[in-house]
Amino acid sequence: MVFAHGFGCDQNMWRYITPAFEADYRIVLFDYVGSGGSDLRAYSDNRYGSLDGYAEDLLDVCQALDLREVVVVGHSVSSIIAMLAAIREPQRFSQLILVGPSPRYVDDPPGYRGGFVRSDIEGLLEMMDKNYMGWASFLAPNVMKNPDRPELSEELEQSFCSTDPRVARQFAKVTFLSDNREDLASVTTPSLILQCSDDMIAPLEVGDYMHQHLKGSTLRVMKATGHCPHMSHPEETIELMRDYLAACE
């Protein structure tokens, strides 16, 4: 079971989930180049100018460890990264667990609502350029959306701030401006979509869209709110993952 973190995060944020699966799976954690404890010298603007570069990271990990029958648990943009990896090497993956996925964050009216208009995204990117710390302190609580547990927002903010600003800005641009809707039809790996009930990053309409266009997918709308249920609501996340994997046996 390979856990792939989301934008601005690192592998440590899976710590509430992984112990529940250690008895049944080999657990693999990693940081994308430019995130967490990775070697920043390996970062390349060219390679990471699209999500394909991050999919290569995931495949590199799987190839280096000779992993087969892999269950990939991807958070946020890593859901799409996992899909791209599974399209390239479908024989390597058994299931995809997609936590808060979105194939397109920008609205495309009248038929698609991603949750943002392009000017929203451009404003966030501009804020990153002008006041990176302010951007982090603004975005973290809105992403986490559990105000009764401020320590979670603080951890996410610290994670944002620990990422090299240049790398974070590029990853944000690639994440929020990519359009991977056409890739959904090419995914053959069975998948579980975990959709939070109130998520500013991936609204309910996005979960429905993913389910409608992703063959062999199962959609579960969670009681959890925010965009990081593996941190804010780990028990519910674990239960839904276990139920899905048991049904796949």
Image (spheres, helix red, strand yellow):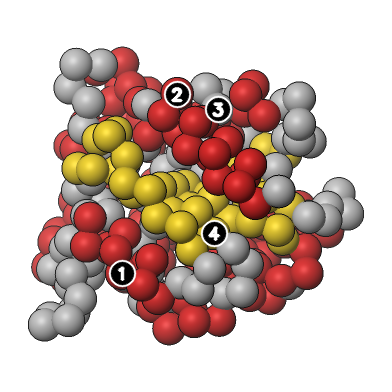
Task: Report the Cα–Cα distance between label 4 and label 2.
Answer: 20 Å
User: Is residue 24 something that shows in the picture?
Assistant: yes
Q: Is residue 27 above or below residue 152?
A: below
- Tell me the quarter of the picture where residue 107 sits: bottom left
Q: Which mark is residue 17?
A: 3
Q: Depth check: 125 or 243 in front?
A: 243
Residue type indicated by callout 1: Tyr
Instruction: Report the mark closest to the observer, 3 or 2.
Output: 2
Task: Report the Cα–Cα distance between label 3 and label 4.
Answer: 18 Å
Q: Which mark is residue 209?
A: 1
The secondary element bearing badge 2 is classed as helix
Residue type indicated by callout 3: Ile
Q: Are marks 4 and 1 in contact (CB under 8 Å)?
A: no
Mark 2 highlights which residue? 235
Q: Residue at x 62, y 35 (%)?
A: 37
Question: What crowding class fits label 4: few (fewer than 14 Cα within 10 Å), some (14-19), or many (20 or more)?
Answer: many
The secondary element bearing badge 1 is classed as helix
Task: Report the Cα–Cα distance between label 1 and label 3.
Answer: 26 Å
Q: Depth check: 6 or 21 in front?
A: 21
User: Does residue 242 appear to the left or right of 119 in the view shown?
Assistant: right
Task: Report the Cα–Cα distance between label 3 and label 2.
Answer: 8 Å
